[in-house]
Amino acid sequence: MERPTWAPDDVNAQRPSVARVYDYYLGGSHNFAVDREFAEEVMRAAPDARMAAQQNRAFLRRAVRYLCDLGIRQFIDLGSGIPTVGNVHEVAQAVDPTAKVVYVDLDPVAYAHSRAILVRNPHATVVRADLRRPAEVLGDPLLRSHIDFDRPVGLLMVAVLHFVPDEEHPADIVAGYAAALAPGSHVVVSHAATDELDEGKDRALNLYRRSSTSVVLRTAEEVAALFGPLTLVEPGVVSLSRWRPDTSDEAGPAETPGLAAVARRD
Amino acid sequence: MPGVTKKRARPPRGLGDAKPAAEGATVSAPRPDQAGRIPPGPAARRPGARQLAKAWAQAIAGTSFVSMGRRELESFLTDLAEQLVATAAVETFDPEVGYKVGAALVDAHFTQPASLDHTLRTLNEHLGGTVGSARGQALQGALAAGFAQALRDRTLVEQEEIRAAAMLAHSEAEAARWASEARFQAVFAGAVIGIVIADIEGQVIDVNQTTCDMLGYTQEEFRELTVNEFIHPEDAPGIWDAYRELTRGEREHIRLEKPYYRKDGTAVWTDLAVSLIRDQDGQPQYVVTMVEDITERHHLQTRLRHQALHDPLTQLPNRTLFFERLGQILEDAGEDARVGICYLDVDGFKMINDTLGHDMGDYLLLAVARKLHSSVCGPGQLVARTGGDEFVVLVERSAGPEQLVDIAEAALAAVRAPVQLGGHEITVSASVGVVERAAHTTSATELMKAADTTLHWAKRDGKNRWALFDADRHAREVTKFELSASLPAALERREFLVEYQPLVRLEDETVMGVEALVRWRHPTLGLLGPDRFIELSEETGLIVPLGQWVLGEACRQAAAWQRQYPQVDLVTSVNLAVRQVQDPNIVAAVNAILEETGLDPSSLQLELTESAVMGSPGQPLQTLHALADLGVRIAIDDFGTGYSNLAYLRSLPVHSLKLAGSFVAGLRPPDSPDPVDKEIVATLIKLAHTLHLTVTAEGVETSEQAARLRALGCDTAQGWHYAMPGSPDQVVALLKAAAREPSPAAG
C-alpha cells in the first residue's frame, strides 16, 4: 500500500484473487483456473469454506433487506468483490428501484467487472479504492455524487475486516467511516471467526497467507469491539446463519463458520 | 418484473423465450408468456404443485447458492411446479415446459450439479404416478437439457465477462504504467540534477542529459563505463568502502561531495546522493545517484579556505595555518620525533617602513617572503608569515639542532641578498630565534614562546644573526626578570642593607675611609651582591630610590661614627649611578641628607663613573659643580675603562680617581707583573697627581700588589688584602683601634 497512487497494480491472472475465489464458492464462473485451484485447495483443508461463503452471502441479503425495512435507501459496500448473484443493488433495488448503491473495491478485475455490470444502472456505481483509507473512500467524488451523507447509510463490510490485521487498526477504520455517517445509519459486518480453529482451518489460513491476502480470525468479543461506540442491534454478534434467519429452519446447523453483526449509529 | 434491473443479455434459448421465473419470485400478477399461455397464479395453485414445491425446496435447498430465503424459494418453486403439473395434465403434452423450468433453475443460480440431480429425483417421485412414464421421462429429459443449456450459456457468458474485465483492467493498468513511465521519463530527462542508474556491479545503465552535459560524455559512452572509472585521486577516504557497503545492501544512502574528471580532463565537483534500489524480495538491484554540480561552490570554498589560511600580501601560509600544522605535527608525533622552528624577524623593518613608506615596506616583505620560500621551503618545511615582519620556518621532522641552524643560516643568507626596491638596491638583515626539541615534550605555545625569547636574544646580541634556544640562559633570564620584578617590594620591605669596605692609606696602612656597598638579603636566594641587581635596578629606574636609600643609610652611619669617634678622620664613599646624577633633585636630596644626618660634607665622597661625569656636557656638569659646592668629595670610579677626556678632566671639580680593578690585577702576579699594566698604572698615578687628584686602587688582593702600588706612589687602596666588605660593627672595631693608636701622620 506504500506505492504511489499512480503506480499501476499488477493485473495478474496467474495469482488467485479473493474476489474470484469467492465467486467460485457461490457457484459462479467469474473466475480463472488459478482461482478454482486455489479454492479447491482451501476446501480440502477447510471443507466448510463453500458453506461459509454461501452463508455470508445469505447474511448480506438478509441484512440489506433489514436495512431496507428500516427505510434506508443508500448503501456503500466496501470490498464488494465480483457482484454476482445476490448482490446488494439487486436486493435493495428489488425493494426500491431508486435505492443508491456504491461498491468499493481495490481489485482491478473486480472493479472492471463491476463497472461493466453497472454501466446502465443510474443508481449504482463502483469506486476503485482501498477500504482501509476511509478518508480517501469517503472523499471520492463519484461516491459523494451517489450518497447523501445527511441521510442514513447502510455501510457494508461483509467478509472484509478479517483481511485487515491488527497493525492496521481495523476498529479505527470502522470508526473513520462511522464518523461520517448520519444518525440512523448502520454498519454491517461479517467476519471469519476463531471459535473452531482446527488444523484444517489453520492450513486454509496459511493458503491465504501465501496468496496476496492473509486472514485474521477474531472472536465474537473482538468483532464486537470493532464497532466502537456504535449500538449493536439484536441479536448482537452471532453466527452468520443465526443473524435474523428468514425462518427457524434456515438457521441450519449450529456450528457455522463465521460471525455477523449489525450496529446502529445513534 | 418491476424493480429488477435486467442486467444480462442471455443468449436465445432455442424454443422461444421462456422467461425464467427466478427473477419473478415476488411477482404478484401472472402475465402471458410469448406462447400465449397464462401461468397459473398463486390463487389457482394446484394442491399437487404445492406439495411438489415443498418437497422440491427441501431437496435442493443448499445445493447451490441462491439469493432467496426458504419462503421465497418455495414460492419460486411453486410456480415452476404448477407449470410442470399443468403440462403433465393437459392433452397436448409439451416437454418444452421442462426445458424452461431447467433454464429457470439456472437463472435463479441453481448452478450446481446436485441441484439438477435432486430436482430430477424429486420430480420422479412426485410426478411418476400422475404422468405416464414416457411423458415423465420426456419432461425430465427436457428439464435436464434446459438446465444444461442455460448453465452452459451462463458459464460462457460469465467467463466472457470476467475475461473482458481482466483485459480491461490489464489495459488500464498498462495505460497507468505507461503514464507513470512517461512521467518518470519526463522527470529523468528534464531534471536539472544529474541522474545515473547503475547496476550492482557498477555498470552504468542509464544517465540523463544533465549528467551528460555535466561530465561531457554522451549517453552511449556512459553506458560503456562502470562506476570504478569515476575514482578520483581527491576522493574523500572511505567513500568507496561506503559504496561497497551500499551495493551489499548494508546501507541505503550515501551523501558525499566528490570530484569527477570530465571527458576533457577538467574537474567537476559534485554533491552526490547515492541510493540503493532493492527488488521486491529486498535484494540490492540498482544504485541511483543524483548528481549536482557544485564546482563553483567548491572553488569558492577552496578560495575562502585559502584566504582564511594564507597571508594576502605574500600568499604564504598565515599564523592560523602555521599553528594548525604545528598542532597536527605535535599531536601525531611519535616517541622520538623532533620538531624545530626558526622564528625570523627583519632587522630595523620599522625604520624602513617609516623612511621608505609602507608600500616599499610591503615590497620588501614580499621580496623576503619569496627569498624564504625559494631557499628554505620544501617537503616537511613550511614557511609562514606570522605577523608584520615576522616569518617562521616549521621543520616537521627535525634531525637535530644542527639542521635548524643550517636552515637559519640559509634563511639569513637569503635575506641578506640585496633587493631592488623602487630603483634602489637595498640590503636588509634579519635575526632568527631557533628552537629545536622533542615533539612530545612541548606544546605549540611553549615552542613559540621559546622562539620569541630566542629571537629577542639574537636581536639583543646585535641582530643579523641567529640564536639557539638555551635552557640555562633562559632560566637565568627568568630569574633575573623575577628579581627585577621583586625589587620595588624588596625596597619597601627593607630587604637591603649596606656593608662597608675599608679604604687604606698605602703610606702607613691606616684606614682613612670606607666604601658603602649595598647588599640584598633575598628571602629565598640569600645575600645577593650588587652585581646581581644593580644593573636590573638601573634598567627599571629603581636605582634612584635605592641609591638614595643607600646614601641616606651610609650618611646616617657615618654621622654616628663621627659623633662616636670624633678624633678619627673617616671618609665614607657612596656610589651614585648615572640616573641618579641625571635626576634634577639629586643636589637637593644630598643636601637634605647632610642636613638631616648632620654629617660633615667633607666626610662624604660620591663615586661617579666616567660616563656619568663626562658622558655629555650640560646638566651633569652643573650637578657635579653643585655637589662639589656642597663640600662633598667627588671621585671618578673605574677610571680608565671609559673614554675620559683628559683635558676636560682638568676643569672638573673632582678630588680623586679610583683605578679600575683590571689595571690593578696586572700587578698581582708575585714574580713578574704585567709591564704594560704597570706602566699604565704609573702613568695614571702621575697624571692624577699632576692634576692634584688622589688615586685609589681597587681590588688589591696581595701584599705584592700593595707594595708595588705604594712604590708607584698610589695614595690609597681597598681590597681583600686589607678587608672584605663588612658590617658597621666591623668598621667600629677598626675605628676603636685607630682611636687607641693615633695615626703616625697625626702623631
Image (cartoon, coloured by chain):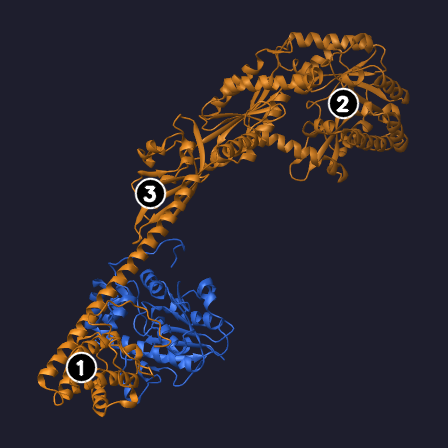
Chain colours: A blue, B orange
A99 relative to A18 in the view: left or right:
right
Would you identify the image quadrant in which residue B527 lies?
Answer: top right
> What x and y, as percent, mark residue A23?
27, 69
Point out which mark residue B503 bears: 2
Residue with the mark numbered 1: B119
Q: CA distance from mark 3 to mark 2?
A: 96 Å
**Tag 3 and tag 2, C-beta contact below 8 Å:** no
Res. B532 visible in picture: yes
| Residue type of the residue flagged with mark 1 | Thr
| Residue type of the residue flagged with mark 3 | Arg
> What x and y, as percent, mark residue A198?
24, 77
Mark 2 crowdedness (10 Å alpha carbons): few <14, some 14-19, many ≥20: many
| Residue type of the residue flagged with mark 2 | Leu
> What x and y, as percent, mark residue B326?
51, 32
Q: Secondary structure at mark 3?
A: helix
**Tag 3 and tag 1, C-beta contact below 8 Å:** no
Q: Chain of mark 3?
A: B
